Image: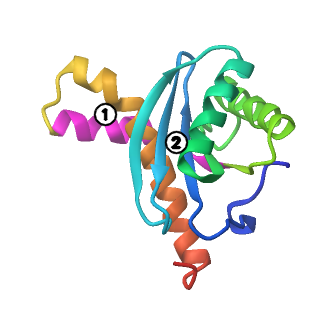
Amino acid sequence: MAVMELDRLTLAAGERLLGLDLGEKTIGLALSDRLLTVATPMQTLKRGKFAADAARLDIIISEHGVGGLVVGLPLNMDGSDGPSAQSARAFGRNWAAHCAIPLMFWDERLSTLAVTRTLLDADASRKRRDEVVDKMAAAYILQGALERLRNIKPSSA
């Protein structure tokens, strides 16, 4: 399965979306509800080689009834691809060769900054911010995609 556009996504009834915030050292994960309305931060995985990361994601996908992935695409502010966006696109290509579950990218510019500000406003300690920022950024990315889906398919819920 190739990388898809969000408006072309077709999920079976009750399937969820899994949001991914790909970092150099970690992958933040967030999971949608079955109605595709709310994204919830899930966990943060230590990043390894693609095969190991994909195997862990396969287990999570199976356990939670996931029908698609939403991967944050960290574009530069001018919309161009930098090294992080190129890395995310490489992950997408590898995923498409690995699994039939569709993957779509979501522009994640400023998502980590927005989450960090929220955590600072909540007076979270540096240690706590470090523990949760990746999975919260994944939820921020996934929530944006869910809101877009709701606008594309208003009668799908």
Q: Position of residue 63 (x, y in %)?
A: 55, 43
Q: Position of residue 96 (x, y in %)?
A: 82, 40
Q: Position of residue 40 (x, y in %)?
A: 39, 49
**Does residue 106 sit above or below 55 in this rendering?**
below
Tell which of 152 and 156 is nearer to you.
156
Tell which of 42 and 122 is nearer to you.
42
**What label does residue 11 carry, if any?**
none
Label 1 sits on a secondary structure element that is: helix
Q: Read off the magenta span.
A: 105-121
Please give left or right for residue 64 compared with residue 130 in the image: right
Instruction: State the image quarter where residue 98 is shown.
Output: top right
Please give left or right for residue 27 compared with residue 126 in the image: right
Given the image, on which type of amino acid does mark 1 rest?
A: Thr
Residue 110 in sight from this viewpoint: no
- Which residue corresponds to mark 1? 116
The main secondary structure of the magenta stretch is helix
Given the image, on which type of amino acid does mark 2 rest?
A: Arg
- Which residue corresponds to mark 2? 109
